[in-house]
Amino acid sequence: MLQVREASVVFPTSDGRSVQALDRVSLDLPPDSIVVAVGASGCGKSTLLNAIAGFLPLTEGSIRLDGEPIEGPGGDRGVVFQKDTLLPWASVVDNVALGLRYKGVPKRERRERARALLRLVGLADFADKPPYELSGGMRQRVGIARALATDPKILLMDEPFGALDSLTRETMQQLLAGIWAQTGKQVLFITHSIEEALLLGTTIVVMSPRPGRIVARFDVDFVRDFASALEIGPIVSGRRFVELREEIRALIHNPPLSRHGALQ
Amino acid sequence: MTVTTDLPLELAPAIRSRRNARPAKPAGEKGTLAIGVVTLAVLIGFWFAASHFGWASPLFLPSPAEVATQFQAVVQDGYAGGTLLTHLASSLWRIGMALAVGIVVGVPLGLSMGMNRWMRGVFSVPIDLYWGLPPLAYLPLLIIWLGIDETSKVLLLTLSTFAPICFSAQAGVRSVPVERINAARSLGASRAQLFTSIILPSALPEILTGVRIAIGAGLATLVAAELIAARSGLGYMIMSAANFLATDIVFVGLIVIAALAFSLSAGMRWLERRLVPWKGKL
């Protein structure tokens, strides 16, 4: 269980003032969940993820993973970045095995486990290629496999499909839904696409900017259907999906003034 | 649209065909070897013509045949106290020593300056100060301190190769994308693992560029230093020949230096292809 309690982050700006990127955000991420944070740019959703990843210290509040306070990055939280961060000098399989190498897993064993993960993301044939010979979508799959390799407690995904074309993005979304359905891996997913949030989330938190805060929370369940769906059309055109999409859109464009609007 | 859970496997052939359809190389990457060879041939042809038709006095421009004869003579009988090979060897020894010391000291120091604020603060000012000086300006000082033998010349060359190597190693560290470092840290990398698996390989292309610049700076300083204060070396051979207006020997020296510079540069390009074939990608 990941618990975020009253987390605030304040950044100094270049003109000597400060920006409240996160304002007393509280959030529970239960195991087996996909929590999707959705909001316009500047709403603090990436700040929240960076704080959970341990890249960014909180100004106030606390983040605990299974009761342990987070004090920096660690192998118990796998991160998938928007920009791919693969190592160009290592083959795809060695990129996936990087976290296992840090753990001291012997070469043969870590490559075997990396190959199994590459099969999971459909890249078994590309294990020995250098990453720069892969397309953007394929590189993001390698990034997901790499984050899964150390078997983290939670997968943190920061707009991982934001830079992909729309067709590739749909494939990747369903791949992630399928992986989640298979592994039950807990995920925190950041996006600015409402549709992506609805398709992938079991919980959706809507965030609004200045200061970054959570204004609403929805528990949904489209992802189970999506994971095994042959057609995406019936899901996204369903009545409840459309209603929620419009409700969230309205919340993002006209956020309520009171804090902690629909939380808990 | 149709989607299935095992879609990635179905997609594999499509992905493969996309990979094969790679775009043609942009014009800037197409080979220029043939053009370069023709240019060189034209220049040599012009040299033949100029000496054949007497456009310039042989004192200023010796004929190619004359230079070839002298080349053979210098290889076999030597000039200014040594054969061509011994002059070449002492020049190579000096620049080799200087490069070795420059790399052994400059790379670790540059890397630590890239990673540590204190190292950067302490060392960047003195290096910046002396790097701005023309090496020949402080050569007399080095000679006063260390004498006229090899030590002063090797130190002079080391100083001129060290700075570009050190600066490029530092720049290499500073250019590592922060996301790459964050990714490694979130995969559980310790500080030592972060250095060996991320920072060092990421900085390697810049370090190799620095070595290439250092070779250029070293060659320039080497020949200049040998012109001023040496008893051997290609620069010394050229200076001795110039004193007797032996222009043909001067040409022999220049051709050997040009060949040396060209092979060192080609060697570095080969090394870059071997060590960092991924440079500029991703």
Image (spheres, rainbow, N blue to C red):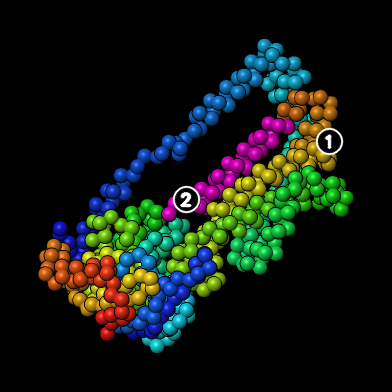
- Near mark 1 (Cα within 10 A), the count class, few <14, some 14-19 or many ≥20, is some
Task: Report the predominant secondary structure element of the magenta stretch.
Answer: helix
Q: Which residues are magenta?
A: B253-282
Q: Which residue is mark 2?
A: B280
Q: Is residue A61 above or below residue B44?
A: below
Q: Residue at x 67, y 57 (%)?
A: B106
Question: The disc labelled 1 sits on which kind of residue?
Answer: Gly
Say which quarter of the image contains residue B244: top right
Could you tell me residue B270's position as x and y percent? 54, 45
Secondary element type, mark 1: loop
Q: In the image, B73: left or right of A261?
A: right
Q: Residue B81: give its label.
A: 1
Quadrant where the image shows the N terminus of chain A = bottom left
Residue A85 shown left or right of residue A188 in the figure:
right
Residue B63's image quarter?
A: top right
Chain letter for the residue marked with disc 2 in the picture: B
